[in-house]
Image (tube, grey):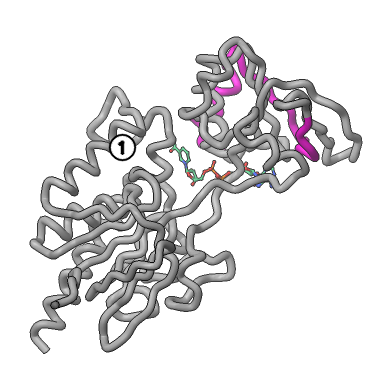
Amino acid sequence: MDKNIWDVAIIGGGGAGLTAGLYASRANLKTCLFEKMSSGGQIALTDTVENYPGFPEGITGPEISAKMEEQAKKYGTEFILEEVAKLEEKNSQFIIRTSSGKEYFSKTIILASGASFRRMGVPGEREFTGRGVSYCATCDGAFFKNKAIAVVGGGDSALQEGIFLTRFATQVHVIHRRDKLRASPILQTRALHHPKIDFIWNAVVESVSGSGKVENLKLKDVNTNQTRDFKTDGVFVFIGHDPETGYIGDFVKLDEKKYVIADPVTMETSRKGVFAAGEIRTGAVKQLVTACGEGCAAALQAQYYLENLEQH
Ligand code: NAP
């Protein structure tokens, strides 16, 4: 029996992967997309997307990801709900091995598995995840109706999600390790003037504790090294992301932070026939619109690569 060989195998179903799927399948390439849970990536966990062109009123993260998935499927992208464990190349063909022990074959690969949220790495964090520690405001915000909560971080995610959480919480205390925010000016202005948001500057969380659920954070002032207890009903952590590249090993070159090194125009990695798009790529602008643009570019490059293969 002939083995099934895909033209394009996309790993990751965020903005980059879904757009790559749309472009590759519209080019009549036999395209599959691997996603370990549900598609949408980080954007599906975002409340409102206000800066994707074409939606002047904004659109919710789950809504835009569902639409992107529908559009990729409409033109033939096949979704494979499996976790990719390893990549190999044999006889000019790529093999995608999954955690469940299956193998898939493809002529090209687009790496688009993005990045996942970073943990604080302090005592109590793991133990209380799902019991007051959260990394997703859209998923868990409603559990904190009429409660006072903390948000850790000073970037766009912390402020955007912190503002969203004021819909439920009585008060949102933003804990930031410096006295200057990293977030964009528009979000800073909104958060700094929000009646339900206040800031705890120059502070880091040292531990999370409680009985059965989060009740207390141990906060350390980074200037004086003094610690104090801070009562809270929950803590949302938005301190950045780390790339999802564990399955890549040395299949393509990674930078020192484990992001994939790829040409920012052609999306080519160190291995011919393998492209990278979106937040997984070193130096990527971490926005939905650029992730989609890179997914498009990677799919077009995969198409040219396949046309070239046929000619030779
Ligand atoms: P980010 O920009 O990397 O910000 C992470 C924040 O967490 C920083 O304020 C950082 O402090 C702090 N931090 C990092 N490690 C920490 C630790 N171990 N303990 C305490 N604090 C720590 O991450 P992000 O906010 O998730 O954003 C990621 C990317 O997505 C950015 O490019 C952002 O612009 C983009 N994004 C855009 C939007 C939007 O356009 N509306 C929304 C969300 C995200 P320092 O400032 O001191 O480094």
Q: Residue at x 26, y 81 (%)?
A: 93
Drawn side of residue 40 relative to residue 7, left or right: right
Residue 142 placed where, x, y %? 51, 19
Q: Residue at x 33, y 51 (%)?
A: 13
What range of the chain is rendered magenta? 183-209
Drawn side of residue 278 relative to residue 219, left or right: left
Q: Is residue 46 visible?
A: yes
Residue 25 placed where, x, y %? 14, 57
Give the amino acid at mark 1. Tyr
Residue 22 placed where, x, y %? 18, 52
As drawn, the residue found furthest toward the front would be: 1
Quarter that holds the C terminus: bottom left
Q: Residue at x 34, y 33 (%)?
A: 62
Q: Is residue 57 above or below residue 45?
A: above
Residue 292 placed where, x, y %? 29, 50
Drawn side of residue 11 relative to residue 222, left or right: left
In the image, is residue 137 part of the stretch drawn in magenta? no
- Helix, strand or loop at label 1? It is loop
Quarter that holds the N terminus: bottom left
Q: Which residue is mark 1?
A: 52
Q: Is residue 53 above or below residue 269?
A: above
Q: Residue at x 87, y 29 (%)?
A: 228
Drawn side of residue 66 relative to residue 210, left or right: left
Of residues 311 and 177, the one nearer the viewer is: 311
